[in-house]
Amino acid sequence: MPNYRRLFIPGGTYFFTVNLLDRRRSLLTDNIDALRAAYSYVQSRHPFETVAVCILPEHLHYVWRLPPDDDDYPMRWQLLKSRFSKSLPRGADPREGRRKGEHGVWQRRFWEHVLRDAEDLDRHVDYIHWNPVKHGLVAAPENWPYSTFHKWKREFGRPINIPPEDWNPIHLGER
């Protein structure tokens, strides 16, 4: 069994990749309202700042900044995944391969990375916003409705300044 080690930093800023168990499904975008409701539920009970996000059909990326006295992001992901899974229509939650109390919608683990500095944050935000282009879902980041690209462009005046032909994403836990 692998020995996963996670870094827990109160007030830390983290990049996450979370995948559906069946990467051929489009449960996240097909049920975007349920995902938003689950997210709001968790955020209202265990506050954190959403720095950037991109929801794709079968996986999602977030950058979260936790409160100064809090480092419990695994609990937040457990609640979010559970709340979303329970809200799905009957038949959307596969039963095979589950442990007690576990839903078969999500992969068991998630990828997390502590962001070290402003440059690291910028790289990860660019990665998040380019992800729909990388996966062939749209021709440009501004065409994807489920991301914070427009917010970043509006609030920070910082659209992605790398032409698509030069974009070479670093490996951040995706297959």
Image (tube, rainbow, N blue to C red):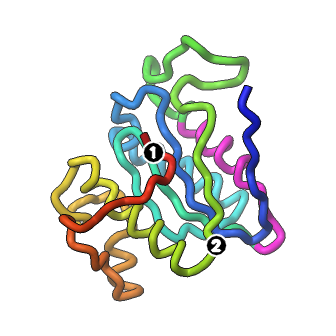
Residue 91, horizontal then vertical, whole percent: 44, 17
Residue 136 marker: none
Q: In the rendered structure, which disc, 2 or 1, sits on the residue that comes first in sequence?
A: 2
Write the start and end of the magenta stretch as one range: 68-84
Which residue is more in the foreground, 47 or 71? 71
Which residue in the structure is indicated by mark 2?
Answer: 116
Q: Is-magenta flag for residue 72?
A: yes
Asked if residue 130 is positioned above or below residue 36 in the image, the reply reads: below
Asked if residue 97 is positioned above or below residue 81 in the image, the reply reads: above
Q: Is residue 77 left or right of residue 11?
A: left
The residue depicted at 61 percent of the width and 45 percent of the height is 80
Residue 9, horizontal then vertical, whole percent: 78, 65
Q: What is the three-letter code of the residue carrying label 1?
A: Glu
Asked if residue 79 is positioned above or below residue 157 in the image, the reply reads: above
Does the CB distance between marks 2 and 1 fall below 8 Å?
no
Asked if residue 147 is positioned above or below residue 119 in the image, the reply reads: above
Q: CA distance from mark 2 to mark 1?
A: 20 Å
